[in-house]
Amino acid sequence: MNQQVLLEQLLELLETAKVQIRKEPLGGSGGGLCNIKGQNIFFVDTDASSSDIAAQCAEAVGKFVDIDSIYIKPVVRQFIESHCENRPKS
């Protein structure tokens, strides 16, 4: 699975968890998750590579999505688990 497809699936998981997605040029850092006035927002840095954004997105998915309770393609699940500090590795 290429990085762009992986990123799209991760962003869909965040949207399902009611996290707003915003795409902005942020200088290449990859963006990240924040909470503004009670709204969870994930910023996608349009200047960053898909792999950098996907890594940050996977961390956010690990915080907001119970990946054990839904079906996620195995390659996507493995990517999320490899980027989440507090998740036990399977």
Image (cartoon, grey):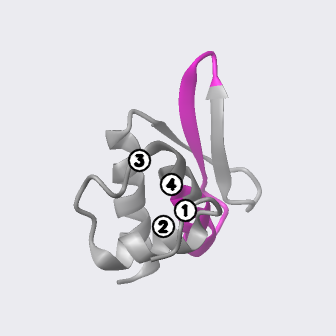
Q: Name the residue under label 3.
A: 65
The crowding category of the residue bearing disc 4, from other C-alpha atoms within 10 Å (few below 14, some 14 to 19, many at least 20), is: some
- Asked if labels 2 and 3 touch by Cβ distance under 8 angstroms, the answer is no
Q: Distance between the residues labelled 3 and 1?
A: 12 Å
Image height of 31 relative to 73, above or below:
above
The crowding category of the residue bearing disc 2, from other C-alpha atoms within 10 Å (few below 14, some 14 to 19, many at least 20), is: many
Q: Which residue is drawn at 58% across and 57% down?
A: 59
The crowding category of the residue bearing disc 1, from other C-alpha atoms within 10 Å (few below 14, some 14 to 19, many at least 20), is: few
- Asked if labels 4 and 2 touch by Cβ distance under 8 angstroms, the answer is yes
Q: How far apart are marks 3 and 4 (CA)?
A: 6 Å
Q: What stretch is highlighted in magenta?
A: 36-58
- Asked if labels 4 and 3 touch by Cβ distance under 8 angstroms, the answer is yes
Q: Mark 1 points at which residue?
A: 87
Q: Mark 4 points at which residue?
A: 62
Dot 1 amino acid type: Arg
Helix, strand, or loop for circle 3?
loop
Dot 2 amino acid type: Ile
Dot 4 amino acid type: Gly
Q: Distance between the residues labelled 4 and 1?
A: 8 Å
Dot 3 amino acid type: Val
Q: Distance between the residues labelled 1 and 2?
A: 9 Å
On the image, the x and y values in percent for residue 18 come to 39, 33
The crowding category of the residue bearing disc 3, from other C-alpha atoms within 10 Å (few below 14, some 14 to 19, many at least 20), is: some
Q: Which residue in the rendered view is the most extreme toward the bottom?
A: 1
Q: Residue at x 63, y 28 (%)?
A: 35
- Asked if labels 1 and 4 touch by Cβ distance under 8 angstroms, the answer is yes
Q: Mark 2 points at which residue?
A: 80
In this image, 17 relative to 55: left or right?
A: left
- Asked if labels 2 and 1 touch by Cβ distance under 8 angstroms, the answer is yes
On the image, the x and y values in percent for residue 77 come to 38, 70
Q: How far apart are marks 2 and 4 (CA)?
A: 7 Å
